[in-house]
Image (cartoon, rainbow, N blue to C red):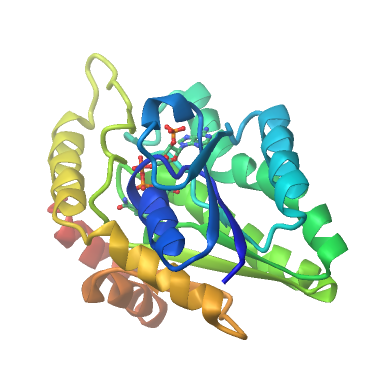
Amino acid sequence: MNKIVLITGASSGIGKAIGEFLNNKGFVVYGTSRNPLNYKKSKFTLLTLDVSDENSIKNTVSKIIKKEGKLDVLINNAGKGITGPVEETPLEEIKKAFETNFFGVINVCNTVLPEMRKQKKGLVINISSIAGYMGLPYRGIYSASKSALSIYSEVLSLETKQFGITVVDVAPGDFVTNIAAGRYHTPLFKNSNYKEHYAKVLKQIDAEVNTGLQPEIMAKAIYKIILKKKPKVRYRVGSFMQRYAIHIKRLLPDRLYEKILMKHYKL
Ligand SMILES: NC(=O)c1ccc[n+]([C@@H]2O[C@H](COP(=O)([O-])OP(=O)(O)OC[C@H]3O[C@@H](n4cnc5c(N)ncnc54)[C@H](OP(=O)(O)O)[C@@H]3O)[C@@H](O)[C@H]2O)c1
């Protein structure tokens, strides 16, 4: 299994679990972190990469190509959380979230795609979110960034198939990782009208992440996708209810679905 794999954001959580799993399966894994020296015990090679810094992406990708002569699989996993009422979330922070979750993926793809085109094959897996299938209260910016990513992936798939490149969008539900610790939480305005709702929903979001699935489940799903001859465009990996919520949304009138979401979040 001499497949060469690059995983962004592989210092913790889902990225780390995917890296360890694929490494155990015999893949040559290059993970990335903005500060790899903080993770000296990584079980696979961890290189420096910030998805918002084009030079760091170019350096890392060229290092891998120089050493291995190819790159078979790119997993765009780096991402960050952001919560808050959309009305009060600072524009600067909205831009930062998109910088990582959306523009960051484009940055990495734009560096890797020419290499894959030369090879006449390659697999790009973008990690979006089930939160990108629906606007979730107080996670609107995160939902929007992941929704944008999923649409980007669909289009990238259409446009790069001609070069032998396969693009797959994988949307996780809740998984127990460091995502909550690294999240940006909007500080509310002094007399904010959202205080009560936001506090209640944030508690629920944290509880749902903390009781989420183990990242190894995502790792196994990614492994299976890599082995597939013809992977689907989109996969959802999560609890039955979280995956089911997407189907329900498709079937029900929007206002009725909104009611269900509001009931779920006790709004
Ligand atoms: N956990 C969940 O419930 C869940 C649900 C749906 C989707 N997701 C998505 O799954 C992916 C992995 O998240 P996770 O839950 O495993 O979170 P995590 O444990 O916080 O890991 C996030 C990873 O992203 C990296 N990262 C953050 N900003 C970066 C940047 N600007 N450039 C490069 N790397 C950066 C971090 O690496 P360094 O800090 O070392 O640079 C870290 O390795 C994310 O895209 C997330 O949105 C997670």
Vertical side of 199 occupied by 156: above or below: below
Nearer to us in this view, 171 or 231: 231
Q: Quadrant of residue 221?
A: bottom left
Quadrant hosting residue 182:
top left
Relative to 82, 61 lies left or right: right
Of residues 220 and 77, the one drawn nearer to the viewer in this rendering: 220
Q: Position of residue 217 (x, y in %)?
A: 30, 67
In the drawing, does residue 184 fall left or right of residue 150?
A: left
Q: Is residue 88 visible from the viewing direction of this image?
A: no
Up-down relation of residue 131 to residue 257 (above or below): above
**Image location of residue 255, percent across then percent down:** 33, 67
Residue 179 coordinates in the image, percent (x, y): 31, 41
Residue 20 drawn above or below residue 197: below
Number of callouts: 0
Determine the residue positioned at 30% across, 48% down. 137
State the residue at coordinates (72%, 46%). Answer: 67
> Which residue is located at x 77 percent, y 45 percent?
66
Residue at 14 percent across and 47 percent down: it is: 204
* Residue most extreme to the top: 190
Quadrant location of the N terminus in the rendered image = bottom right
> Height in image: 84 above or below 252?
above
